[in-house]
Amino acid sequence: MAEIEVTGVTKVFGRRDVLRDVSFAVEQGGFLSIMGPNGAGKTTTLRILATLLAPTSGGVRIAGLDPSDDPMPVRRTIGFISHQPLLYLDLTAYENLRFYAEMYGVPERERRISDLLQRVELSHRRYDQVRTFSKGMLQRLAIARALLHQPRVLLLDEPYSGLDPHAVDILDGLLAEIRAEHTFVMVSHSIAKTLELSDQVLVMDGGRVVFRQSGTIDEAHFAAVYREHVSEGVAV
Amino acid sequence: MESAALPVTAPALRVTMWRQLYAIVKKDIVSELRTKEMLLSMFLFAVLAMVIFHFAFSVRAQTDLTYFTGGMLWVTFVFAALLGLNRSFVHEKDEGCLDGLLLCPVDRVTIFLAKMTGNLVFLLVIQALAVPVFTLFFVKASYLGDLPAFLAVLVLADLGVCSVGTLLATISMNTKARDLMLPIVFLPLIIPVLIAATSGTTAIFAQTASLGSLGPKLLFLAAYDGIFVLAAYGTYDFAIGE
């Protein structure tokens, strides 16, 4: 059974169709990347998977669960890494992780928080206010936040956006470490990163899936196909 | 890179509504104590309003303001509360924290109750500081004997202010002109609370209060609180949603 199933999803904001009949599936342990120009509906798709938005029509199942029946168990299975850190700037790194650990009911909180802070190389800043962190440090802490409750599915919304090379290395290392036992959906603008990580790629434009490919994907071929299907250029 | 093995098998996560409510309230209080933005602005407003009332109404020495005291006190508190309510979701909007909160397996009503509790705590703190100052300025006779009745009016009216205010602050948070929107929708809805709290407080300060005269006002305030907490229970999912 697919870990993530999206069937005929549409989303309408006011009179604007943001998503039109979007369907895809990701097997357990799969890594799907969604590409496309700004306004293509990538982030809306991700927010529907994250239960932050409800589809206007169509169905979503994550780990066999339907968020429209009961979103709570679905939220427990999801970790979300956005280009925004989703962290409280006036709290310390430890207080942020402690807060989210309490919200998810994470067992052995202290050990889990220490492990994750060590893994993202922020142990030495655990009692510093997040307001004083650089963009890269914020994103590293956001990764720790997303992994805190050991989710089965990770949703990544432009996770590499604004990261320094060191933070990119840490994120790559973390993703490699947990790759086999998680299912991923990533929204990205970078063809190189997308093809490096993914085993399935969707290209969206105007709220529709305009191209999809699985398996090994040649970068030059994909870049050409991408340009053929969408009007805007992308970073390679 | 440091190495620390991350267990990836998801554990059975167990969390109660009360634990989540406590976590959100604690987080809001710790954040506020770090910045003191909300408490300081609410307290300064309350003190300045009292100073302005003092000079505005003292047109003649020995003017008896007893029958204006309830009105002055509650106008001050309602506008001070409005300042706080406008700020109550600022931390959530920063850096997408509201998304972080909504991603948690938490019932939306728990978020409402936690936010309402936080707003209530901040308002009570301001009142604990402002009421003695107000008493010093405006109240001539001691109302220590009626203190339980005064506290009952205060807490019930505060609950009304915070339940309506939290619900409307949530709705207005996602609007373009949220700073303007909240007072426009909040003030008309709070008038019933203002009337009951003002007449109850004035009666206490004027020493004309009795259980018979205050009872219906307290019941009215309790009913108002109940209605708006129930309204929030039924609508908060939509209020905080898309």
Image (cartoon, coloured by chain):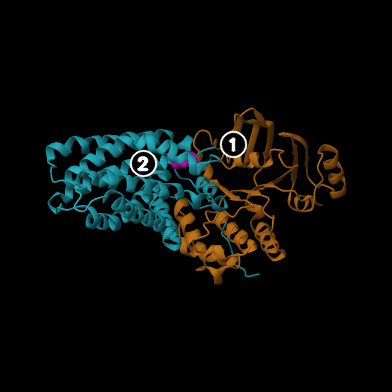
Chain colours: A orange, B cyan
As drawn, B55 above or below A7: below
Query: Residue A78 location in percent, x, y?
Result: 57, 47
Chain under callout 2: B
Q: Which residues are magenta?
A: B168-172
A139 part of magenta stretch:
no
- Say what amino acid the circle numbered 1 marks: Arg
Q: Which residue is mark 1?
A: A61
**Residue under numbered circle 2:** B163
Whether residue A1 is visible here, answered yes or no, is no
Percent coordinates x, y for residue A15 in the rendering = 64, 27
* Residue at horizontal 30 percent and vertical 39 percent from the top: B194
Of helix, strand and loop, which one carries label 1? strand
Magenta span: predominant SS is helix
The CA distance from mark 1 to mark 2 is 35 Å
| Quarter-of-image position of residue A19 | top right
**The N terminus of chain A lies in which quarter of the figure?**
top right
Within 10 Å of disc 1 (Cα), the crowding (few <14, some 14-19, many 20+) is: some
Residue A33 numbered mark, or none:
none
Query: Does residue A44 appear anywhere in the picture?
Result: yes
The picture quadrant where one finds residue B197 is top left
Outermost residue toward the bottom in this view: A124
| Amino acid marked by disc 2 | Ser
Camera-side residue: B163 or B73?
B73
Q: How many marks?
A: 2
Q: Is residue B20 left or right of residue B53?
A: right
A174 or B153, which lies in front? B153
Which residue occupies 44% across, 63% down? Answer: B34
Instruction: Say what secondary structure mark 2 lies in.
Output: helix
